[in-house]
Structures are given as structure tokens and as C-alpha cells.
Image (tube, grey):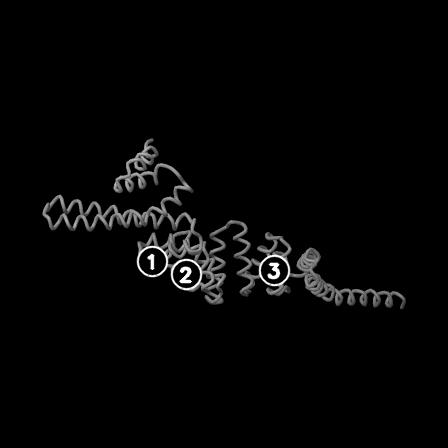
Amino acid sequence: MRSGKILIFIVTLYFLAACSAPKVMTSMKTSAKEFESHGNLDAALNSWEQYFSQTSLDEIAAADFADAAKTAYRAGNLQKAVEWFDQARYKNYADAEMYETLAEIFHKQDNLSKELSALEVYTEKFGKNNSDVNSRLFEIYAEIGETQKAQTYWSLMNEVQRSREDNLVRYLELNKKMDNNVLADSIANEIIELDPEQFEALEWLAKKYYWEGQNRYNREMKAYEQNKTRKQYRILLEELDKVTIDFKKALPYLEKLWEQKPGKEYAAYFANIYARFGNEEKANFYKKYTKD
């Protein structure tokens, strides 16, 4: 009789322990969320780790892995964040913050291909209405030379992002590659309004006006050599006046470039311009820099 009572007692204890285990585990998850709500990220991370280590994988909701991964990211544990996001993805879970956070992690790790993949999945699943995502995709596509995709995401960016100097410089380089010269002129001028010393915009405008003048000079001199009439001579003089105007437009940009990067390349432009102006002293000054 006594042994029967002991057996009943043991079974009861086992039953109570079995019932309390899920409560303990649920408490761990609740504690993790409570710790995070109070800003104690390390404790929250520890509670998540205990919850996952003591709970069957089949019993863990995908959303729990995603929530824990976000906590890990905020706590600065990027490795754990990626690990738990991978578990959430394995269980076919997805939310917008998850892919934004993954992209941020890969950006910090300088893993451009994985960052791009995360952002592309974001747009596939959640659309193209996130201006921050669109802006970053524009930056990446511009960097890797995907010109058409970069153009697409430029149009999806908001006005504030399209007005940022760094994005305008990327857009300038993009249009230069695509030989959209008229648009590149406009972008360069917009950049100069924001930053009068911006190198790429200065160089684009300096070379634009210089080569307009130089090409005009070469073209009209050739025409006159082939047809030395009074009429052609008058045309030559008119066109040479335009050459002077083009060179004068190029000079302020060249002078700012010279301040930033004096040397052989820009010296050649100066030497030629001042030779055309008949200023022998300045032409000779810059010619010295053109020699090896």
C-alpha cells in the first residue's frame, strides 16, 4: 500500500514538471521581450538564447526567430542576428524590417552582393515604396555599372534624396557613361550650386567648355585652310570670337581644379588657352608643368 502511494507521488511530480516546462519556456520568451522594452538588450538576448536552446525547433515560431534576430542586431551581435534571421527564412517567414535589417548588417560587413540580394528581395516582397531602400539600390546599381537599373531607382527616389550631393555626383557619372551629355551638364551645374568646389562637376564643365572651344577652333581653321576667301575669313573671325567665349567659360572651372590638383593634365589646358589669348607669359608658365 505504501509503495503504491510513493508511485502515485512520483507520477504526480513528473506530471507537474512536464506541465511546468512549457510555462518556463514561455516565460523565457516573455522575459526577453520585457527586457528589451526596458532597454536591457544583453539580458533580452540571453533570454532568447535560453528559450531556443531549451525548446524543440519544431515548436519555435518563425516570428520568434525574426524578433530575436532584431534584438540581436540592436544588441550589436550581427552574427547571431544573421543566424536567427536564417532560421526565420528557413521557416518561410518574411517581414519588411527583417530584410531591411539584413541589408544593414551586410552593409556593415561590406558584403555588397548579400546586401543587394536582401534589398532586391525586399522590393520583390514589399514593393518599391521605401525611399531609403530605393536610394541604396540606386547607389549600388550605379557602383556596379547597372545603368538601366540605376536610372529606374533614381526615378523612384524622393526629391530630398535626389537633391543630395553624393547622389547627384553618382547620377552625373551615370549619365556620363551613357553619353547623356546635355543631362550631365544640367546635373553638374546643380552640383556646383550645392558645392562650388566639387571636383567631378568642375572637371565635367571645364572640359565641356574647353573642348567646345578647341573643337570649334580646329574645325574653323580647317575650313579656312580649304577655302581662303574673304567670306570664309569673316566666318573664321566670328567663330574665333566664340572660341574665346568658350575658353573664358572654361577658365574659372580650371582654376578651381588647379587649386585642388595642380599638375600636367590641367596645365596643358591653361597653356593652350593663354596661347590662344596671346598671353605668352602665362602660356609659358603652364607649359613648364606639361614637361615630364
Q: Which amino acid is tagged 1?
A: Leu
Alpha carbon of mark 3 to alpha carbon of mark 1: how far?
Answer: 42 Å
Disc with the residue nearer the chain's start (3 vs 1): 3
From the image, which quarter does the C terminus lie in?
A: top left
Q: Quadrant of the N terminus?
A: bottom right
Q: Are marks 1 and 2 in contact (CB under 8 Å)?
A: no
Residue depth check, mark 1 versus mark 2: number of the one nearer the observer: 1
- The dot on residue 183 is 1
Q: Are marks 3 and 1 in contact (CB under 8 Å)?
A: no
Q: Nearer the viewer, residue 27 or 138?
A: 138
Residue with the mark numbered 3: 70
How far is the residue under mark 1 from the one under mark 2? 14 Å
Q: Nearer the viewer, residue 91 or 239?
A: 239
Task: Report which quarter residue 104 is drawn in.
Answer: bottom right
Name the residue nearer the viewer: 16 or 226. 226
Q: Which mark is residue 154?
A: 2
How would you rate the neighbour count of disc 1 (Cα within 10 Å): few for under 14, some for 14-19, many for 20 or more? few
**Residue at image coords 39%, 44%:** 257
Q: Residues within 10 Å of mark 2 (few under 14, many from 20)?
A: many
Lower position in the chain sequence, tag 3 or tag 2: 3
Q: Relative to residue 228, is residue 129 depicted above or below?
A: below
